[in-house]
Image (cartoon, grey):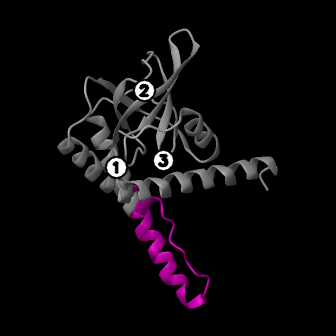
Amino acid sequence: MKQNNPGNYNEELTTLCYQEVIPVEWELLKEPADVASQQRYQHDNAVLLQGLLVVDEQPAIEHDEELSSLGQELQRIDHKLNLILELLSQTLRSWRNLPVPVPVRLAVDGVEWSSEQELPIGALVLLKLYLSPVFPNPFTATGSVQSCQSTGAHAYTVSVCFDEIDGPVRDALEKLVFRQHRREVARARLRNSGGR
């Protein structure tokens, strides 16, 4: 099981992370997940992350006059596909009861979220993070609790360090975290400049 230094982990969360309010499911494990389960999680995560990256990718449309009609057609098709995905995801979400969304900070090596329940330090955890309303399937990972800090009555901030994530999934997660982080930085700059 991969264990990171909690100090380094928290430092990474403050620099490069995916911050969002999303549903989180977790359960304590009595023993580490078996190899078959881990392989299934990795496969499902790879499919999910690739889907998120493709949907999140904005096509580059050149401003050449000859390409303007092609660009408009691509945008029209893109809009239709996004609408179909959203309708499909709404249908799928109506079939399953997701937990109430909570603030989450996701990094490549771990995650931090707000919980109503205290988790013991060092406990093994199975996590399901619903990263996008477009894809109702979760990012699933196992890990160990690095810290659990009280933030009030029945309120805690829990940090979990993931078990080792294989190469393709890690690469896709890095891209997703980087894109979302870059977008947040751009939004912050826009707010600081007065929306100009």
**Element assignment for label 2:** loop
| Among the 4 quarters of the image, the one containing residue 6 | top right
Q: Please tell me which residue lies in front, 170 or 131.
A: 170
Q: Please tell me which residue lies in front, 82 or 32.
A: 32
Q: What residue lies at 47% left-to-right and 44% top-to-bottom?
A: 109
Left or right: where 31 falls relative to 185: left
Above or below — where is 73 with respect to 126? below
User: Label 3: which residue?
Assistant: 108
Q: Which mark is residue 87?
A: 1
| Among the 4 quarters of the image, the one containing residue 144 | top left
Residue that extends furthest to the right in the rendered view of this protein: 193
Above or below — where is 164 with respect to 153? below
Left or right: where 68 falls relative to 2: right
Q: Residues within 10 Å of mark 2 (few under 14, many from 20)?
A: few
Q: Amino acid at mark 1?
A: Leu
Q: Residues within 10 Å of mark 3 (few under 14, many from 20)?
A: many
Disc 2 or 1, which lies upstream in sequence?
A: 1
Spatial distance from mark 3 to mark 2, Cα to Cα?
23 Å
The magenta span reads 52-80
Q: Are marks 1 and 3 in contact (CB under 8 Å)?
A: no
Q: Amino acid at mark 2?
A: Val
Report the mark closest to the observer, 2 or 1.
2
User: Label 2: which residue?
Assistant: 100
**Element assignment for label 1:** helix
Report the mark closest to the observer, 3 or 2.
3
Disc 1 or 3, which lies upstream in sequence?
A: 1
Above or below — where is 148 with respect to 18? above
Disc 3 or 2, which lies upstream in sequence?
A: 2
Rendering coords of residue 142 (x, y %)? 34, 36
- Magenta stretch holds residue 125: no
**Element assignment for label 3:** loop
